[in-house]
């Protein structure tokens, strides 16, 4: 099953022969194109379309004016993720019979031989492993027939799309009970039981009976005098029993 790919960036359109590229700028010994800084990189890229053999005395011209060209083309781009070897592919089409050299981050990757003047050379180049971050592709040309320069048709970088991993629902783990947590729970339970035993609700406490009070003062009833005389009579009776008086027969007078 072929791997799914996506276009990371593209400069120019295949088959147009570089006519959509900007023609303003003249010759530059080295030119660096930053991917993402161009407002319309496909329909009107602001990059030279002519790659010139270094050391050429006469630079490409048209009607007495130098064409937008360079001896060394750098393409600077940024990867959002890392790719293994072969997961990135550079599509590079050009016209001419020169031999181009592709470099990645200063290291040579391959040489590309043109099929002839006026004929498109279509290449697909697997790139080495690249990490996430900024990188630079460099193109130079040398040798071959022709006038020492050739036109770039277009460039495109594709990357393999990483397969999405199925999401699995994870059940939250119940915290494991340690010896310390068990002892803590047992102590808390004991304290709760002891607290329940010692606490007494107001409904459980028997109320103290209130002393019934008389609403009529005894001074107004005479009961206090009566009690005094009863006690006095009782004491006198006991005394008379201890010392009884002799009984004398009396005379009854008529």
Image: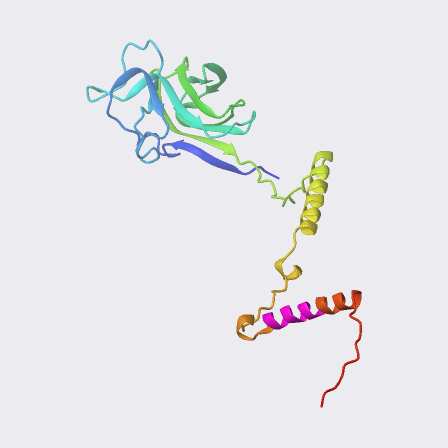
Q: Is residue 29 left or right of residue 156?
A: left
Residue at 31% over, 35% down? 40
Main SS of the magenta part reads: helix
**Whole-percent x, y for residue 94 in the image:** 40, 26
In depth, the one of 86 and 141 nearer the eye is: 86
In depth, the one of 145 and 94 nearer the eye is: 94
Residue 21 lies in magenta, yes or no? no
Residue 231 lies in magenta, yes or no? yes
**Whole-percent x, y for residue 52 in the image:** 34, 16
In depth, the one of 76 and 101 nearer the eye is: 76
Residue at 54% over, 71% down? 219
Q: Quadrant of residue 15?
A: top left
Q: Quadrant of residue 254?
A: bottom right
**Whole-percent x, y for residue 42 in the image:** 35, 35
Above/below status of 58 relative to 237:
above
Q: Quadrant of the N terminus?
A: top right
Q: Is residue 129 left or right of residue 204?
A: left
Part of the protein shown in magenta: 224-234
Residue at 20% over, 22% down? 63
């Amino acid at each position: 099953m072929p791997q799914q790919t996506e276009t990371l960036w593209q400069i120019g359109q295949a088959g147009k022969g570089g006519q959509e590229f900007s023609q303003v700028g003249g010759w530059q010994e080295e030119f660096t194109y930053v991917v993402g800084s161009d407002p319309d990189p496909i329909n009107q890229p602001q990059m030279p379309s002519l790659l010139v053999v270094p050391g050429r005395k006469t630079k490409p011209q048209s009607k007495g004016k130098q064409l937008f060209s360079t001896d060394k083309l750098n393409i600077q781009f940024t990867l959002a993720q890392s790719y293994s070897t072969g997961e990135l592919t550079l599509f590079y089409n050009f016209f001419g019979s020169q031999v181009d050299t592709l470099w990645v981050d200063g290291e040579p990757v391959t040489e590309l031989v043109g099929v002839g003047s006026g004929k498109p050379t279509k290449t697909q180049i697997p790139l080495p492993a690249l990490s996430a971050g900024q990188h630079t592709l460099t193109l130079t040309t040398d040798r071959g027939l022709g006038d020492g320069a050739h036109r770039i048709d277009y460039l495109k970088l594709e990357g393999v799309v990483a397969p999405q991993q199925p999401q699995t629902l994870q059940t939250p783990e119940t915290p494991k009970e340690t010896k310390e947590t068990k002892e803590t729970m047992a102590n808390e339970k004991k304290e709760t039981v002891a607290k329940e035993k010692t606490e007494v609700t107001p409904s459980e406490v028997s109320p103290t009976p209130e002393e019934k009070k008389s609403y009529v003062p005894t001074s107004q009833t005479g009961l206090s005098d009566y009690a005094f005389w009863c006690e006095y009579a009782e004491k006198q009776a006991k005394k008379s029993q201890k010392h009884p008086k002799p009984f004398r027969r009396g005379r009854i007078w008529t």
